[in-house]
Image (cartoon, rainbow, N blue to C red):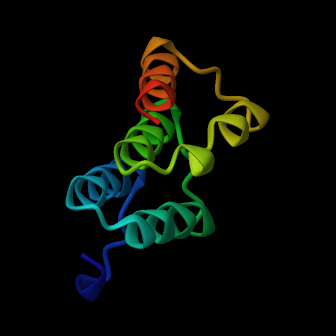
Amino acid sequence: MKHRHCEPEEYTYTILIKMMGKMGKIDDLIALFHEMISKGCIPNLIAYNTMIEALAKNRMVDKALFHEMISKGRTPNLIAYNTMIEAFAKN
């Protein structure tokens, strides 16, 4: 996309983050999340839930952005709470 001068949007970043999480590429998904923010895309609830899920699946609960999500005005939903509880229980 970038090679064709088409910048990814929030939805595209969220899909890429999800794929990086499934592949276990933690550094890449964190970099994508920060790139998304630096490019002016404001993460919505789905983007935060995707990050929390990807980090939790890779046993990175301590980096799970839950507090950042709340401080940015995104109210966690049932998916976010369930993901966090499941991750803590596994650890």
| Residue 29 lies in quadrant | bottom left
Q: Is residue 4 left or right of residue 83?
A: left
How many discs appear? Answer: 0
**Residue in the picture at 72% in, 36% down:** 67
Position in image of residue 20 (x %, y %) = 28, 61
**Residue in the picture at 52% in, 18% down:** 81
Up/down of 31 relative to 89, above or below: below
Up/down of 40 relative to 81, above or below: below
Outermost residue on the top side: it is: 78
Q: Is residue 21 left or right of residue 28?
A: left
Up/down of 52 relative to 90, above or below: below
Quarter of the picture holding the N terminus: bottom left
Up/down of 87 relative to 85, above or below: below
| Residue 27 lies in quadrant | bottom left
Q: Is 11 in front, or is 17?
A: 17
Q: Is residue 64 left or right of residue 78?
A: right
Outermost residue on the bottom side: it is: 3
Q: Is residue 49 left or right of residue 11?
A: right
**Residue in the picture at 31% in, 81% down:** 2
Position in image of residue 22 (x %, y %) = 22, 53
**Residue in the picture at 40% in, 65% down:** 26
Outermost residue on the front side: it is: 91
Position in image of residue 28 (x %, y %) = 39, 72
